[in-house]
Amino acid sequence: MSKPAGSVRVVRGDITEQDTDVIVNAANEHLAHGGGVAAAMVRAGGSIVQDESDAWVREHGPVVAGTAAVTGAGAMPAKWIVHVVGPRFRTGRDNAPLLKDAVRAALSAAADIGARSVAMPAISAGVFGYPIDEATQIIANACLAWLVANPDSIDEIRLMGFGGETAAAFRKAVS
C-alpha cells in the first residue's frame, strides 16, 4: 500500500473531548443513544444530539449498514457527529467486510461535509461483540486504505481508545 497523504494516529482519551471536525459514533440503526460511546456523546453534547438523531431517523428511516447519518455535535468541541452502524459480530460470518464498510461510510460522509479531521472509535468492539484486536486491525487498515484512495481529503484520523486496552490494540494495529 502506498503512503497516505493524511495521517492516522492513536489517541487514548475521551472521544467527546476531541477538537476534530468530526467524531464518529458507533450507533445502532435507530440512533437511540442509550449506552457506550453514543450515550457519552449525548451526555457531553446535550439533548440536542439525541433530538437531531431522532429527527434524522424520522426523515430518512433507520441507518442501514454501509451508510452514515450526520448530525451536529451539540456542546462538544467537534462540529459534527457521523453515525455509522457496525456489524454485530457473529461467529462463522465474514464480519470484516461489514466493518470496513462502516469505516468507509464514516470517512466518506466526513469528507462530503468538508471535514479535515476525524476521531474514530473501535466500531463494533463494544456491545456489538467484535473482538478488540481484530476490530482495531480492520479499522486501522480501512482508514489507511481510505486515505490512500482519497488523497487531499482528510488530514488526520485519530483512532480513539478510551481505555488502555483499546488504545494499545490500535497502536499494535497501526505499527
Image (tube, helix red, strand yellow):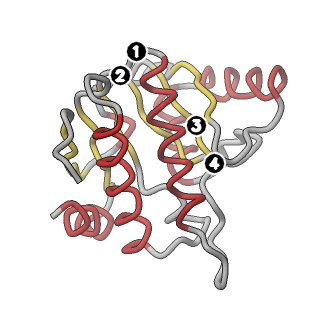
| Mark 3: amino acid | His
Q: CA distance from mark 4 to mark 2?
A: 20 Å
| Mark 2: amino acid | Asp
Q: Residue at x 66, y 84 (%)?
A: 92
User: Which quadrant, please, contains the C terminus?
Assistant: bottom left
The answer to whether marks 4 and 2 mark residues whose Cβ atoms lie closer than 8 Å is no
Q: Quadrant of residue 60?
A: top right
Instruction: Check the image and name the residue furthest to the top.
Output: 114
Q: Residue at x 44, y 35 (%)?
A: 107
Name the residue beneath numbered marker 4: 85
Name the residue beneath numbered marker 2: 21
Q: CA distance from mark 1 to mark 4?
A: 21 Å
Sequence-first tag of 1 and 4: 4
Mark 4 crowd level (few <14, some 14–19, many ≥20, 10 Å Cα): many
Q: Residue at x 84, y 24 (%)?
A: 58
Sequence-first tag of 2 and 3: 2
Nearer the camera: disc 1 or disc 3: 1
Sequence-first tag of 1 and 2: 2
The answer to whether marks 1 and 2 mark residues whose Cβ atoms lie closer than 8 Å is yes
Name the residue beneath numbered marker 1: 114
The answer to whether marks 3 and 4 mark residues whose Cβ atoms lie closer than 8 Å is yes
Mark on residue 148?
none
- Under tag 3, what secondary structure? strand
